[in-house]
Image (tube, helix red, strand yellow):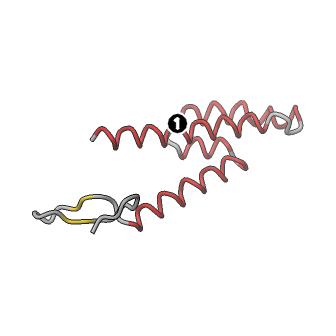
Amino acid sequence: MRQTGVIWAERDRRGKKTGLSPQYVCKALYIGIMNYLLAILLPPLSILLTGRPIVAVLVFIIWIPALIFSGGLTHPMFIILAWALIFHAREDRRHRRDLS
């Protein structure tokens, strides 16, 4: 039985699954939250986990000297960049899922 606002794993007449299981939704939510928290501590690693390895390497190359020379004053800039990239990757996934 499908309830409004809740994604459940159902099977249609042919036995094919429709929708997502609650376990998958909880796991995806947990990974998303953990990536945002990781962005606070290690923005380059968080960017790497979103699927942007080249940007992550470039950010890492800029991030280390910026931390050393500015005394950590530039760290919030990298956190905001990581959060924006995480949000953008999530919106891309949502858009691709809506198209299919």
Is residue 32 or residue 65 the one in the foreground? 32
Instruction: Name the amino acid type tagged 1.
Output: His
The residue beneath circle 1 is: 88
Asked if residue 32 lies left or right of residue 70, the reply is left
Please give the name of the residue rendered at 73% of the width and 50% of the height, measured from the top-left corner: 41
Quarter containing the C terminus: top left
Query: In the displayed structure, would residue 42 be above or below residue 13?
Result: above
Please give the name of the residue rendered at 81% of the width and 33% of the height, measured from the top-left corner: 74
Please give the name of the residue rendered at 72% of the width and 30% of the height, measured from the top-left corner: 62
Asked if residue 6 lies left or right of residue 53, the reply is left
Is residue 95 or residue 39 the one in the foreground? 95
Q: How far across and down, in percent of the image, does residue 95 sit?
A: 39, 38
Q: How far across and down, in percent of the image, does residue 94 sit?
A: 41, 43
Please give the name of the residue rendered at 39% of the width and 62% of the height, measured from the top-left corner: 6
Secondary structure of residue under mark 1: helix
- Name the quadrant containing residue 71: top right
Quarter containing the N terminus: bottom left
Q: Residue furthest front?
A: 4
Asked if residue 14 lies left or right of residue 78, the reply is left
Query: Callout 1: 10 Å neighbours few (<14), some, many (20+)?
Result: few
Asked if residue 81 lies left or right of residue 97, the reply is right
Figure label count:
1
- Name the quadrant containing residue 10: bottom left
Q: How far across and down, in percent of the image, does residue 97 sit?
A: 34, 44
Q: Residue furthest left?
A: 14
